Image (cartoon, grey):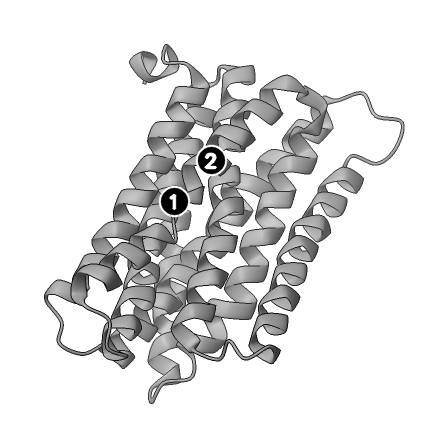
Amino acid sequence: MSAIIQIHFILLALLATLFTWLVTALGASTVFFCKKAPADTLKYFLSASAGVMIAASVWSLILPALDYAQQQDLSYPQWIPVVIGFFMGGGIIALTDRFIDSLSRKGVKKRPLLLFISITLHNLPEGFAVGCAFGAAAITQAPADYTAALILALGIGIQNFPEGAAVSLPLKNEGASPLKAFFIGQLSAVVEPLGGVLGAWAVSYVVKIMPLSLSLAAGAMIYVAAKELIPESMSGRRPTLSCLFLLFGFALMMVLDVALK
């Protein structure tokens, strides 16, 4: 861990989000091996991803945001900036949803395209979340905070795999070549390194925004999990099994975050 701490935090954020992008590309590469999208299997992956995202939002973002708020000499309750940031994050993604709906009303009805836009736009706050975590760790210089940032990147990487497949496989089913479907699938995560660098820079530049920025990223991730991943994952033939995968994803991320600190 001491070797990692010596690396510049913005470079760490960039490398971590390049990893999450790579995992998305691995998910998109399933078009070269699957003739048809395995609908039920994909839903189970999405359900586990939702569990990972929810756990990561709590242990790696909201709880640290509350800790940083308590460390500041504020004239108001420390939870206020965390709550504000949380709702701001959800609100940003809600506006994104309205933008996607407007595209649909204008005739853009192909579900793969809408799914690509949705995943691309929510990948930005995911990258921002990783960047915020590394920026916060650089300020505290606490090994536990660096570990939490690495675990957050790992969790987001895990849930990016089915997202890459969720974009590329339907595109292939609609007639796109495997190479084109793969390219578009991995492209959905190209914004994550941008979000990572932006998040790390923002937190390091203004220390007092850490509670707001971390909780903003958490709100965005919770909204995406509740609005996109969970409904989609529960629409299959075995919703009970999907629920179990969600619990598994949540427990896995919780154990990783707690056990490795």
* Mark identifier at residue 125: none
Q: Position of residue 150 (x, y in %)?
A: 37, 33
Mark 1 — residue? 190
Residue in view at x 42 percent, y 63 percent: 116
Badge 2 vs badge 1, beta-carbon distance below 8 Å: yes
Q: Amino acid at mark 2?
A: Leu
Residue in view at x 71 percent, y 49 percent: 88
SS at mark 1 in the image: loop
Alpha carbon separation for disc pair 2 and 1: 8 Å
Instruction: Count neighbours of disc 1 (C-alpha within 10 A) and say few if under 14, some if 14 to 19, many if 20 or more.
Output: many
In the image, residue 72 above or below residue 241: above
Quadrant occupied by the C terminus: top left
* Mark identifier at residue 194: 2
In the image, residue 225 above or below residue 87: below
User: Could you tell me if residue 36 is visible in this image?
Assistant: yes
Q: Amino acid at mark 1?
A: Val
Q: Position of residue 81 (x, y in %)?
A: 76, 38
Residue 116 is left or right of residue 31, and the answer is: right
Q: Quadrant of residue 227?
A: bottom right
Residue 148 is left or right of residue 185, and the answer is: right
User: Could you tell me if residue 243 is visible in this image?
Assistant: no
Q: Residue furthest bottom?
A: 237
Residue 221 is left or right of residue 24, and the answer is: right
